[in-house]
Image (tube, rainbow, N blue to C red):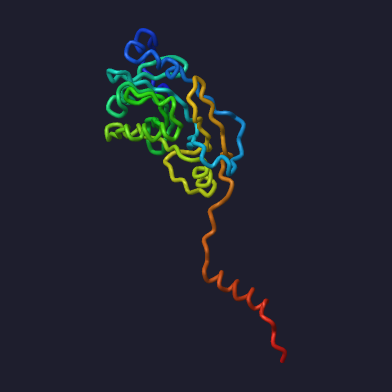
Amino acid sequence: MLDHVQGVEISILTDVLSHVHAGNLRSVQQNFIVDAEELEHSRFDAEKPATILPKRACFICLIVDTKGNTFVSTDKMYTAKMHYSLRTIVPNDSVVYALVFTVHNCKRPVLGVFDASRVGGHSLSQRKCIERHALLHQAFKSSSRYPHIRMHWVGHERVLVHDLQYKRVTVDFDIDCAVRLSDTLSECMRYARLIPKEPLTTLVPRLNPTKMLETFKAKRAKLTPQTPP
């Protein structure tokens, strides 16, 4: 899927750092690792940041320089292909992180932007993950010309785990699992799997008022003393 996004390989020193701040070098060289070991969610983790990991998704870092050029950083540095240019979608002088994945009924992979270390020349390195996502969301401009570039959901772990368990998540892609994101930005970003690939429970049973009333009457009858004939 990355072949759809990556263009010509370039030199990071000559082509990129002349357009972005030198202090962004650590942000540009990002490695993304999803741990194979699953973590069990607990109520103590309720407020931790999490997102949905689509099946066969790839993590990438994208840089929009001060002139609006878009670069892709994975193991090497590339220019972004025209269809994945963020020139009119993300402010210049930004470093953002995204997932690349396939969606139903679409030939072109989707770029789901979910985090950032810099937006419009402002460093977000001291912000927590959900704060960074909110600031990126405010600056993000969707475009009908680029329907395959979107914001990817980020929120609290308790909400995501609960909704996935009870099949309350409606998306246009196949779900792998939920992952816990990192509040702290680093050169190597590690994300932890939270739940198995399949939801843990089935649909929540709907309440049946008639059946509930019958059950209540039956229990009440058992508790009511019987009058001797």
Image-based side of 87 in relation to 159, left or right: left
Residue at position x 33%, y 35% in the image: 138
In terms of depth relative to the viewer, which is nearer, 181 or 204? Answer: 181
Q: Quadrant of the C terminus?
A: bottom right
Residues 148 and 163: in front is 163
- The percent position of residue 23, horizontal first and vertical second, equals 40, 15
Residue 99 quadrant: top left
Name the residue: 27% across, 18% down: 67
**Vertical relation: 155 (above or below) 100:** below
Name the residue at the front extreme. Answer: 126
User: Foreground residue, 68 or 5?
Assistant: 68
Return the x and y of residue 12 as percentages of the image width and height. 39, 11
Give the percent coordinates (x, y) of residue 71.
36, 18
Residue at the outermost top position: 14
Q: Residue at x 60, y 30 (%)?
A: 36
Locate the N terminus by quadrant. Answer: top left
Relative vertical location of residue 39 with respect to residue 2 in this rendering, above or below: below
The percent coordinates of residue 212 (x first, y second) are 56, 69
Residue sitting at the far bottom: 229
Mark count: 0
The residue lying at 32 percent from left, 32 percent from top is 139
